Image (spheres, rainbow, N blue to C red):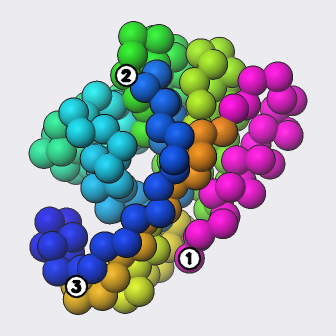
């Protein structure tokens, strides 16, 4: 990851409104590889937990997040959903950001799960949508079409303005997030 980051030109399109309160950072599962670098554009001192699956690939992601000084919460909408949701809500209430892939861990690709909306509405946390669009990349044949940027290109990072989901019906909130997340999707 570091080699990819260092050998690419970087362009950042950041939100002008970065809340000091904890937020939920959302990005598609297939685009998660470079997201820690974008997080450091928002928070110079990291204070975040990333929701990951409790499978083998999740343990690899957890170890990688540790190198970035980011914590993890293991579980998913498929396994231990209620426990993960409670832990994520508690994490937000104690002042820690949450990173989440609303279409993970198994898809379908580009779907927004209920959990992100419930977290945001129960805590009042805003959602900031992340994306990294590389000019050169490999794309795996997995369900999420996982993107691995190639060296010597450009990494264009995008973030939305904070999105407030309070007071919205579940379907409306999911549609709003989906629309924001698709703006810069590959």
Seen from the viewer's position, the closer of residues 59 and 8 is: 8
| Separation of marks 2 and 1 at Cα, in angstroms | 29 Å
Residue 171 visible in this rendered orientation of the protein: yes
**In the image, 39: left or right of 98?**
left
Number of labels in the image equals 3
State if disc 1 and disc 3 touch (CB < 8 Å): no
Q: What's the magenta region?
A: 164-186
Placement of the C terminus among the 4 image quadrants: bottom right
- Residue drawn at x 47%, y 63% as measured from the top left: 13
Placement of the N terminus among the 4 image quadrants: bottom left
| Separation of marks 3 and 1 at Cα, in angstroms | 18 Å
Where residue 185 appears, as percent x and y from the top left, is 59, 70
Where residue 100 appears, as percent x and y from the top left, is 48, 41
Q: Nearer the viewer, mark 2 or mark 1?
A: 2
- Identify residue for label 1: 186
Let me know if residue 28 is in the magenta part.
no
- Residue drawn at x 19%, y 49% as measured from the top left: 64
Q: Earlier in the sequence, mark 3 or mark 2?
A: 2
Q: Secondary structure at mark 2?
A: loop
Label 2 Cα neighbours within 10 Å, binned few <14 / some 14-19 / many ≥20:
many
Where residue 60 appears, as percent x and y from the top left, is 22, 50
Residue 90's label in the rendered image is: none
State if disc 1 and disc 2 touch (CB < 8 Å): no
Let me know if residue 168 is in the magenta part.
yes
Q: Earlier in the sequence, mark 3 or mark 1?
A: 3
Label 1 Cα neighbours within 10 Å, binned few <14 / some 14-19 / many ≥20:
few
Q: Earlier in the sequence, mark 2 or mark 1?
A: 2
Q: Secondary structure at mark 1?
A: loop
- Identify residue for label 2: 96
Residue 151's label in the rendered image is: 3
**In the image, 7: left or right of 124?**
left
């Amino acid at each position: 990851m570091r080699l990819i980051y260092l050998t690419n030109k970087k362009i950042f399109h950041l939100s002008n409104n970065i809340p000091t309160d904890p937020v939920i950072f959302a990005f598609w599962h297939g685009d998660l590889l470079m997201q820690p670098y974008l997080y450091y554009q928002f928070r110079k001192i990291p204070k975040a937990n990333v929701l990951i699956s409790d499978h083998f690939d999740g343990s690899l992601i957890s170890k990688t997040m540790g190198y970035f000084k980011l914590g993890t919460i293991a579980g998913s909408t498929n396994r231990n959903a209620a426990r993960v949701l409670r832990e994520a809500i508690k994490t937000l209430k104690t002042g820690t950001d949450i990173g989440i892939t609303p279409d993970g861990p198994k898809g379908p690709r580009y779907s927004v799960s209920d959990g992100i909306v419930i977290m945001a509405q129960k805590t009042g946390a805003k959602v900031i949508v992340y994306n990294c669009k590389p000019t050169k990349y490999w794309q795996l044949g997995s369900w999420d079409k996982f993107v691995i940027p190639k060296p010597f290109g450009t990494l264009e990072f995008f973030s939305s303005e904070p999105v407030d989901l309070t007071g919205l019906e579940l379907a409306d909130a999911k549609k709003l997030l989906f629309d924001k997340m698709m703006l810069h999707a590959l």
